[in-house]
Amino acid sequence: MSDKLKLKYESYRELPITPLIKAGVSRLVETPWHLHGKPQVNQAKCIGCRLCWLYCPEGVIAVKNGEVEVDYARCKGCGICANECPVKAITMVLR
Amino acid sequence: MAHLTIEELPSEEYYMPGNALCAGCGESLAMRLALKILGWRTIVITVPGCMSAALIMGASAVPLLVGPFASGGALLSGVETALEAKGVKDVNVVAFIGDGGTADIGLQALSAMVERGHNVIYICLDNEAYMNTGGQRSGATPLRAATTTTPGGRLFRGKLQPKKNIPLIMADHEAPYVATASIGFALDYMEKVKKAADIRGPKYIQVLCPCPVGWGYHESKTVELARLAVATRVWPLYEVEKGRLKITYEPRTPKPVREYLRAQRRFDHLTEEDLAELQKLVDEGWAELKLKARSAEE
Amino acid sequence: MPVSRFIDGNAAAAYGVKLCRPDVVCAYPITPQTPIVEYIADFIARGEMASKYITIEGEHSAMMATVAAASTGVRTFTATSSQGLAYMQEGLFYAAGSRLPIVMAVVNRSMGPPWTILAGHDDAIAQRDTGWIQLYCGSGQEILDTVIQAYRVAEDERVLIPIMVCFEGFVTSHCYEQVIIPDQEEVDSFLPPYKPPYKLDVEDPMILTTFAPPIHWMGYKKKHDEAMEAARKVIAEAEAEYAERFGRSHGGLFQAYRCDDAEAVVLTMGSLASTTKVVINKLRELGFRLGLLKLKSFRPFPREELKQLLGNVKAVGVLERNYSVGGWGGAVFLELRSAFYKVADGPRILNFVAGMGGRDVTPLEIEAVAKKTLRAAQEGKGEREVEWLLGEIG
């Protein structure tokens, strides 16, 4: 089964017998909603507690080599990470 | 049992972003954390609700079956039995179902599944209303909360019935493991999910998932509110194992209930008298729980 | 060695299921189906059947647990009647839409109110739009043979549609007769192990039953309908092979009796066919050129095959145990009439609504039905197109 969600078919005959998709394909969709802005991380202030990673509802925060990285293409901008950071190292920056 | 630490948690994700759930969705976090701890050898069951909308569009990286609204318990039973027939071992069969599909339309199937003793985990993602369809009341909507079918205001006073206590109902079914959890206490929640996975039989966990749209608060406060619910003792954290109740977190200085209620627009219509009454009910509920816990210790 | 046992229709169904070795059986008791689930529980308890058995708490859950088990890639069986069938209707759409080859015994009982526990086909007929194949049986032997053929047809990759094996409550389900139970080995060679088209598998994780956007949705239904059409051929094929291997036939899509030179034919389903056969034989002795068409497959409705067979007949009297209130006739009558729409020189088609709520249909009544059909054949018109057999046959 292909990763790609097929939206276009030549004819109905190409459809599978029932809608089936490979698990996990929603990761191919981008949701850069940034509702309350984009989370900017002050790496100097960061104490590496990982609470931002833990509490992100979408799992778009990764901590690599002590650095907090945000997948901005999939960040909805809820601001939970900024709210939970114990040292206020994350600021939600509106455009 | 040693408590889970954040460093021990696996980095793999089995819940994908790119779904259409609201920013700051409590259920989203609950789903992500549970799948993280359960791992890839997991089959997920769900029924219509906020989470099913995300999962069927591919947010689940593990196999998923969706059934009609009332069928959660039945689907779990069927999958578990089929795996047994095939001799497939060490696969978690887990349902993630909202409070509607648990307390109301799905209660029969859940109750029967537990009574039959299937080796499955049932996780109720509790956002306290039928949020996926706009926020109609469910049996799990708390007392006096405003929903679209129980509006709060001058003439109406929100939901007039108390929150149906599904965890205690499940404990009375003699389910081998029952627990309440909150995404505000993420590690505690994940520990409970892991514990459930290691026990044989039907396990029930109800995790409180605040909903910014339905409850009326700023999206960034989801986790904070989930913590506040526990700190005010509105949502106590406990587990029931083999009929013995144990409180898993006791707030040293409980916060006043009003702090929790005033933080959500769904309780805006409450008067000072209402707040006092609800504080009294929470205090009484807590005292009862302590009594149960004490008698369990004896 | 095949054995011959004196058993009732429900037991015949249970023996048929036993021979097909389902992995999971999940059914809720309801009169007159209850003995089926009891016989199966007994077979399992005695170690004669290796299936897992879920003592489910209701029919809606019964169908959904069966769907879930089938989605995990195993052969399944369930059974119900009437009220239970209606209660699980949501699940019927689910099973058919998911294209799962579930086989279900439906012991036909009329839908209440008015309350009854007795025979009528209206329960299964009311579910004809759910997308299931419906095969109607008239005897214990036919039930056993049909259950085995049903798995073969349902699991065929050209079909992949769930099948209802229907038979009347009490009249057939509780009626004892000599039934030949074939050899397990013979059935194993007729029915290959189940190969699921898809399944829940952690090694190949998939999302089942996901959403279909508007531009696709009808395409899935069209494919389902095409599989139904293909099923007509598969049903006939499976039946022919079964007849050759096991030495007995009840007809695949239908069974025609003395229709070749008939002027008029009585068309019916289930147990009424055997009574009608007796009547036809008697009237033939008196010189009336009558035939019997025992329809077995109601869904898919074999319209092409029936058009061909009944094309030269002057009148068909459809005798059925169901009626669609507010329509104009019973379901089989409506389908047959529709099949012959605009066919030049097609037969006159009459409808006789009978035997619902357990009402007995006597040979005398069927004789009147046959004679009225014959009169319509000879005079080119019927007295009434739709007639209810309520006891006023003149």
Image: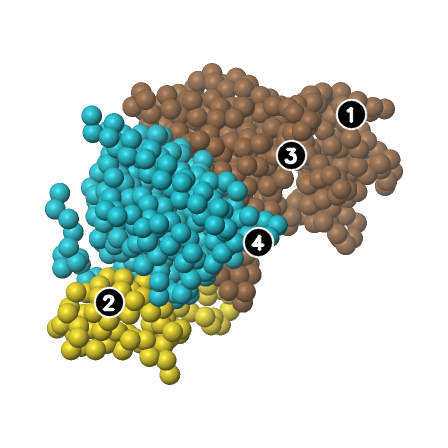
Q: Which chain is disc 4 placed on?
A: B
Mark 3: secondary structure: helix
Contact between labelled residues 1 and 2, with CB atoms less than 8 Å apart: no
B249 vs C40: above or below: below
Q: Which chain is disc 1 placed on?
A: C
Mark 4 crowd level (few <14, some 14–19, many ≥20, 10 Å Cα) = few
Report the mark closest to the observer, 2 or 3.
2
Residues behind callouts 2 and 1 on a single chain: no
Report the mark closest to the observer, 2 or 4.
4
The residue identified by callout 1 is: C390
User: Please, what is the three-letter code of the amino acid marked with disc 2?
Assistant: Cys
The residue identified by callout 4 is: B153
The residue identified by callout 3 is: C122
Q: Which chain is disc 3 placed on?
A: C
Nearer-the-camera pick, A51 or C153: A51
Q: Which chain is disc 2 placed on?
A: A
Q: Distance between the Cα atoms at labels 2 and 1?
A: 80 Å
Choose the circle earlier in sequence order: 1 or 3.
Answer: 3
The residue identified by callout 2 is: A85
Residue at image coords 45%, 48%:
B275
Question: What colour has chain A?
Answer: yellow
Q: Distance between the Cα atoms at labels 4 and 1?
A: 60 Å
Quarter-wise, where is residue B212 in the image?
Answer: bottom left
